[in-house]
Image: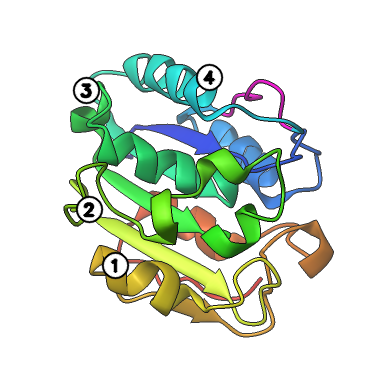
Amino acid sequence: MTTRSCLILHGWQNHRPENHWQHWLADRLTELGHEVTYPQLPDPDDPDLEVWLTELARHLDALAAGAERVVVAHSLSVLLWLHAVARDLPGLAGVDRVLLVAPPSGSVLARYPQVEGFAFAGGVVGRPDGRPLTLPHPTRLVAGDGDPYLPEGVQAAYGDPLGLTAELLPGAAHLDLDAGYGPWPSVLDWCADGRARLTVR
């Protein structure tokens, strides 16, 4: 079995409840013998982008050498990851592949003072100097249809700017507890094999 070092990043107001799919995923990966980091990021109800970027850099540095390094980001942490890429955050080079799940749109973030700082300037995903954002790792982008935090649709808001073909899961909304996620077997399959098909729970 290939040993993996997995970093799982949560979203806004997420205190890592045990019945959330990310907690389920962390537990299953640990049971399979992989190294798993699923940190509680500081002040999840009122997060600060700079603080979260510092934490992200620290956790990237701690990923195990010699293992396949896998990152799974949900919701607000998708924006965290994209800001890290835009700033060439140290430690990114060691990552092998990334799964971005249900990012909220900039127009939604702008409505909430607690998280508006995570939106990209002008609502356009890109580098601070205006250049397009090029992802340095094999990356999958997945979202649910009818996501209330992504009214523009995942392809328009993130797929097109990032040069990715988004995968849309029917009935999955924000892929959170309200949508029943919960155990999500196909995300575990993806952690084992980056070519695995992502399906509804």
What is the CA distance from the residue labelled 3 to the residue labelled 4?
Answer: 28 Å
Relative image position of residue 109 (x, y in whole percent): 62, 53
| Disc 1 target residue | 161
Residue 107 in the image, given as x and y percentages of width and height? 58, 63
Q: Do the residues labelled 2 and 1 touch (CB within 8 Å)?
A: yes
Query: In the visual, does 136 lie left or right of 57?
Result: left
Determine whether, in the image, residue 163 is placed left or right of residue 192.
Answer: left
Q: Which residue is drawn at 36% across and 22% down?
A: 60
From this viewpoint, is residue 2 visible? no
Q: Which of marks 2 and 4 is nearer the N terminus?
A: 4
**First-in-chain label (2 vs 1):** 2
For disc 2, the marked residue is: 133
Structural distance between the alpha carbons of marks 3 and 2? 28 Å
Question: Residue at 23% across / 54% down in the picture?
Answer: 138
| Membership of 25 in magenta stretch | no
- Whole-angstrom CA distance, mark 3 to mark 1, is 32 Å
| First of labels 1, 4 by sequence position | 4
Q: Quadrant of residue 144?
A: bottom right
Report the residue at 36% width, 21% height from top. 63
Q: Which of marks 3 and 1 is nearer the N terminus?
A: 3
Residue flagged by tag 4: what amino acid is it? Val
Gap in angstroms between the C-alphas marked 2 and 1: 8 Å
| Res 160 visible | yes
Please give the residue where the numbered disc 4 appears in the rendered image: 51
Up-down relation of residue 84 to residue 157 (above or below): above
The amino acid type, in three-letter code, at marker 3 is Gly
Question: Taken as a whole, is the magenta stretch helix, strand or loop?
Answer: loop
- The part of the chain drawn in magenta is 38-44
Mark 3 — residue? 66
